[in-house]
């Protein structure tokens, strides 16, 4: 019997494995999908060599807007592992079951939550505070930033906490400096992006966490293992393992462990918990589903770069406008805040930025080539009880496991926030003398951000939360959930850095509890 | 050859010599180069409308082939025909509507419009839009969606790539992910619940 069973191999499962094995704890890691090999599973092709000329294969993965003909085979097939929802309230559940999960393909943006998010209720009265503060997480953030090799610039802003960075000393391009100046005139902060560079560009569980865990000799990895249910000791009521199905043969197996760490991703972990009918004395497993609003923003053109006349250093690069709303002054239209990703491009500008076609469109594409700049929102979605997931008893996946039903929708807070972001972006572009070509005030569907959060939130009160401040189930001390399902609020920040910090912290706590004989 | 030297009679291992496959280069021909094409999804008038749309929205420009030359209508006929119901409906309804509009405005079906007439039907519905956010008004949605699809299908076509290559600008390659250990068994599963 292993000491700890870890379900999932992404950032949260990987850092849990690295942390626990380093403390001498034996772990078995189950992953639903296969281990991927670049040599065997991918090859260079042109779009015309693909079955559908680069289009996403018809009838497949309709909710994965990020999919195209090149990457269609990395995403979970919606027919193989379906989910249900009300047609009026669609949800984009974007999943990867390959070993390493979505840590293979993430955007690398790495930001700490601030106490404006962790203590949001204390600040504005909405929702609940996390049971921990930035001071509790800071040591783990620093260690996570070191492993992930996060590069950024120190800003000394309370809403944009600085970290243990590889310092980015580079200059902004001229176009970004113009937006920076416009922002500065309005008291809006403007900073370098903060990105994880990992090793040779890969910042995945597979290359940053798993090798260290394997080197201890304390980790066994089982790919192609689809976990269908957690098991419970009938005498103690404690979780003591899991039933899983070999993906390719359908064979049923059972693995036992002293403790179980769920790291399958917010919705898969919650699905497993609901199917196992465990750890829900609060009635809140599945509740308070959140993500972040994406998709609203603008595309503009820098006139000095049109006609192929861009001087060196005018275009290129990226920046971030971190949250500046609802810090001191309060908006009457929404609570919490958003960030804007600012990108200056040197290549072609998309045809959809012009209401034209044919020869006339081509002339515009030639004229505007190399002059594009975009500003796009990343905004906090509020945690609401009614946004939730349940098990759809009428539908099963390809292995006979009941699927998730997702019921969630955005509200005026999100829509007003998106509108505000676009207005600010248009104002900054106008002030900088840029031509706004296209804009959109409507967020993409829930789930699009691939940042699903909540549904097993942490808290001090077992009646109001599923997990304690250490990501341990209030109900079952041998059960830990270390992915983003523990989040109490979403924040605007990409969640990966916080997921890694929380999972590291929780794993160290579990290790100590095992050493003390409490687990 | 003596009886002692003759190879053993069948059976032999069926993979005998399979390694020699690597030394054989087999040139291929595109199906449309040898086969005839019949529309499989769109009706004849809808195909005519789609062909006119292709010729108007992306004609040959500056020595590059247009959508018709790149087989875009034929590609979309297959692609849309295999797509989900909402996409199929969008196209069929949209193509029929275009023809009805041009008949109402100019007394001809869209497939027979002049450039000016086609522009008169299309231009009121052209919009700027951002990624994953096509206009929501149904007519604008269709016109801008079909324009985007025509462009993508054309710029990603083998005919386009051949011209790029002959111009000394071969098309860029990107990483294509093959099916990764695909499930090949279909289990007779019942709900596995406690």
Image: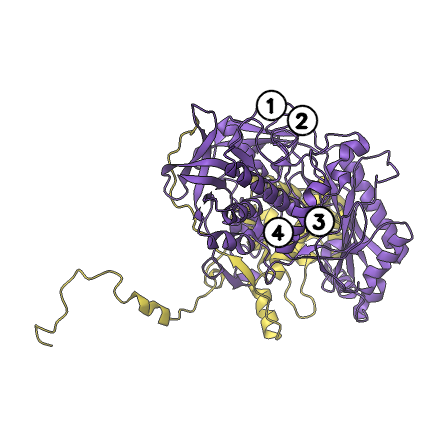
Chain colours: A purple, B yellow
**Helix, strand, or loop for circle 4?**
loop
Of residues A434 and A362, the one nearer the viewer is: A434
Q: Are marks 1 and 4 on the same chain?
A: yes
Structural distance between the alpha carbons of marks 4 and 2 = 29 Å
Structural distance between the alpha carbons of marks 1 and 4 = 32 Å
Q: Which residue is mark 2?
A: A386
Disc number lying in front (2 or 3): 3
Of residues B153 and B193, the one nearer the viewer is: B193
Mark 3 vs 4, N-terminal side: 4
Q: Which residue is mark 3?
A: A111
Q: Are marks 2 and 3 on the same chain?
A: yes
Q: Quadrant of the N terminus of chain A?
A: top left
Label 3: chain letter: A
Mark 2 vs 1, N-terminal side: 1
Numbered disc total: 4
* Residue A434 appears in the picture as rendered: no
Q: Tag 2: Cα neighbours inside 10 Å, few (<14), some, or many (≥20)?
A: few
Q: Which residue is mark 4?
A: A106
């Amino acid at each position: 019997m292993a000491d700890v069973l870890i379900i999932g191999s992404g950032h949260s499962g990987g850092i849990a494995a690295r942390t626990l094995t380093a403390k001498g704890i034996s772990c078995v890691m189950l992953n639903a999908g296969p281990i991927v090999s670049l040599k065997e599973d991918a090859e260079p092709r042109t779009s015309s060599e693909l079955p559908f000329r680069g289009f996403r294969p018809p009838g497949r993965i309709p909710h994965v807007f990020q999919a195209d003909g090149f990457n269609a085979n990395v995403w979970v097939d919606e027919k193989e592992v379906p989910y249900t929802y009300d047609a009026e309230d669609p949800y984009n559940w974007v999943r990867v079951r390959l070993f390493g999960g979505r840590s293979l393909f993430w955007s690398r943006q790495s930001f700490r939550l601030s106490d404006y998010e962790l203590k949001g209720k204390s600040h504005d009265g909405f929702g609940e505070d996390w049971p921990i503060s930035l001071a509790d997480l800071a040591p783990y953030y620093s260690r996570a930033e070191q492993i992930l090799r996060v590069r950024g610039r120190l800003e000394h802003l309370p809403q944009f906490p600085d970290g243990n960075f590889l310092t980015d000393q580079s200059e902004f391009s001229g176009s970004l400096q113009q937006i920076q100046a416009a922002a500065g005139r309005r008291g809006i902060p403007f900073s370098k992006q903060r990105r994880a560079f990992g090793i040779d560009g890969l910042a995945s569980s597979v290359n940053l966490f798993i090798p260290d865990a394997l080197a201890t000799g304390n980790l066994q990895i089982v790919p192609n293992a689809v976990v269908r249910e957690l098991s419970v000791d009938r005498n103690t009521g404690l979780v003591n393992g899991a039933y899983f199905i070999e993906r390719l043969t359908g064979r049923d197996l059972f693995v036992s462990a002293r403790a179980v760490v769920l790291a399958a991703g917010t919705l898969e972990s919650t699905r497993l918990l609901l199917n196992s009918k465990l750890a829900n004395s609060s009635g809140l497993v599945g509740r308070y589903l959140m993500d972040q609003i994406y998709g609203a923003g603008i595309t503009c053109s820098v006139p000095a770069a049109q006609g192929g006349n861009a001087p060196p250093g005018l275009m290129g690069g990226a920046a971030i406008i971190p949250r500046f709303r609802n810090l001191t002054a309060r908006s009457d239209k929404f609570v919490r805040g958003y960030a804007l990703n600012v990108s200056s491009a040197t290549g072609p500008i998309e045809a959809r930025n012009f209401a034209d076609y044919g020869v006339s469109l081509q002339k515009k594409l030639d004229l505007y080539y190399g002059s594009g700049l975009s500003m796009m929102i990343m905004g906090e979605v509020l945690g609401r009880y009614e946004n939730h997931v349940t098990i759809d008893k009428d539908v099963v996946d390809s292995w006979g496991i009941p699927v998730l039903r997702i019921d969630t929708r955005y509200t005026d807070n999100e829509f007003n926030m998106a509108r505000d972001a676009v207005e600010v972006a248009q104002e900054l572009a106008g002030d900088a003398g840029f031509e706004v070509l296209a804009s959109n005030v409507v967020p993409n569907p829930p789930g699009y951000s691939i940042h699903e959060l909540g549904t097993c939130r942490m808290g001090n009160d077992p009646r109001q939360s599923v997990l304690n401040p250490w990501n341990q189930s209030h109900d079952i001390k041998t059960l830990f959930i270390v992915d983003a399902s523990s989040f109490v609020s979403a924040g605007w920040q990409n969640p990966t850095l916080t997921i890694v910090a929380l999972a590291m912290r929780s794993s160290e706590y579990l290790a100590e509890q095992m050493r003390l004989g409490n687990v | 050859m003596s009886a002692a030297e003759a190879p053993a009679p069948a059976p032999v291992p069926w993979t005998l010599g399979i390694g020699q496959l690597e030394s054989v280069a087999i040139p291929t021909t595109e199906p449309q180069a040898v086969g005839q094409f019949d529309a499989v999804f769109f009706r004849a008038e809808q195909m005519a409308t789609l062909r006119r749309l292709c010729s108007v929205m992306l004609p040959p420009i500056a020595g590059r082939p247009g959508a018709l030359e790149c087989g875009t209508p034929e590609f979309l006929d297959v692609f849309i025909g295999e797509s989900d119901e909402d996409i199929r409906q969008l196209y069929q309804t949209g193509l029929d509507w275009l023809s009805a509009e041009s008949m109402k405005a100019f007394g001809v079906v869209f497939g027979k419009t002049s450039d000016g007439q086609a522009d008169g039907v299309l231009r009121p519905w052209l919009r700027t839009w951002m990624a994953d956010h096509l206009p929501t008004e149904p007519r604008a949605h269709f016109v801008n969606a079909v324009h985007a699809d025509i462009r993508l299908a054309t710029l990603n076509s083998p005919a386009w790539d051949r011209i790029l290559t002959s111009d000394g600008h071969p098309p860029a390659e990107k990483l294509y992910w093959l099916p990764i250990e695909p499930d090949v068994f279909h289990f007779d599963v019942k709900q596995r619940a406690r």
